[in-house]
Image (cartoon, helix red, strand yellow):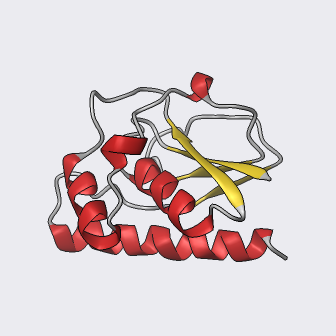
């Protein structure tokens, strides 16, 4: 099974959401991981709250902020849209989702990003199942 890493700088919001939704929606198609070049003490609390509310997923129980060096060998790297130099990780395929960081924004903006990640996960699943 392919291993997909969702990467951003801090591994606290978008990449964590993508890891959770990857496991939830596409666990039968690929293994999902997330990491960054830096870590935060905790996952973004707005992301945690909204993922519980929308999907019943408690990211704090199953995930933590991780560094790139903690990942197994990865087949596919998905960067979230770092707005700086995105971290590099060797892989056979790489794509950037160009997502704005919703940190510090209202729930409507967060939900918009979460729904876009959901759509992108389902698209990736479909492409890998071909």
Q: Residue at x 29, y 72 (%)?
A: 54
Q: Is residue 87 above or below residue 125?
A: above
Q: How far from the left and from the top, in percent, is residue 7?
A: 54, 43
Quadrant in the picture for residue 23? bottom right
Q: Is residue 114 above or below residue 35?
A: below
Q: Is residue 68 above or below residue 122?
A: above
Q: Residue at x 58, y 44 (%)?
A: 33
**Residue 97 seen by the camera:** no
Relative horizontal placement of residue 27, taking residue 119 as reference (left or right): right
Q: Residue at x 56, y 71 (%)?
A: 120
Relative horizontal placement of residue 81, taking residue 94 as reference (left or right): left
- The residue closer to the viewer here, 96 or 46, is 46
Q: How far from the left and from the top, in percent, is residue 127?
A: 76, 73
**Residue 27 seen by the camera:** yes
- The residue closer to the viewer here, 35 or 60, is 60
Q: Residue at x 27, y 34 (%)?
A: 42
- The residue closer to the viewer here, 79 or 51, is 51
Quadrant in the picture for residue 12? top left
Q: How far from the left and from the top, in percent, is residue 69?
A: 60, 22
Q: Quadrant of the C terminus?
A: bottom right
Relative horizontal placement of residue 71, taking residue 16 as reference (left or right): right
């Amino acid at each position: 099974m392919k291993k997909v890493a969702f990467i951003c700088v801090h591994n606290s919001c978008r990449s964590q959401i993508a890891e959770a939704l990857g496991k939830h929606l596409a666990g039968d198609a690929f293994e999902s991981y997330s990491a960054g070049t830096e870590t935060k003490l905790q996952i973004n609390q707005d992301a945690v709250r909204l993922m519980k509310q929308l999907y019943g997923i408690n990211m704090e129980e199953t995930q933590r902020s991780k560094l790139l060096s903690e990942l197994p060998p990865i087949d596919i790297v998905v960067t979230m849209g770092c707005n700086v130099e995105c971290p590099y990780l060797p892989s056979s395929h790489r794509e950037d989702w160009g997502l704005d960081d919703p940190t510090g924004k209202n729930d409507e903006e967060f939900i918009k990003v979460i729904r876009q990640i959901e759509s992108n996960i389902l698209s990736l699943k479909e492409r890998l199942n071909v």
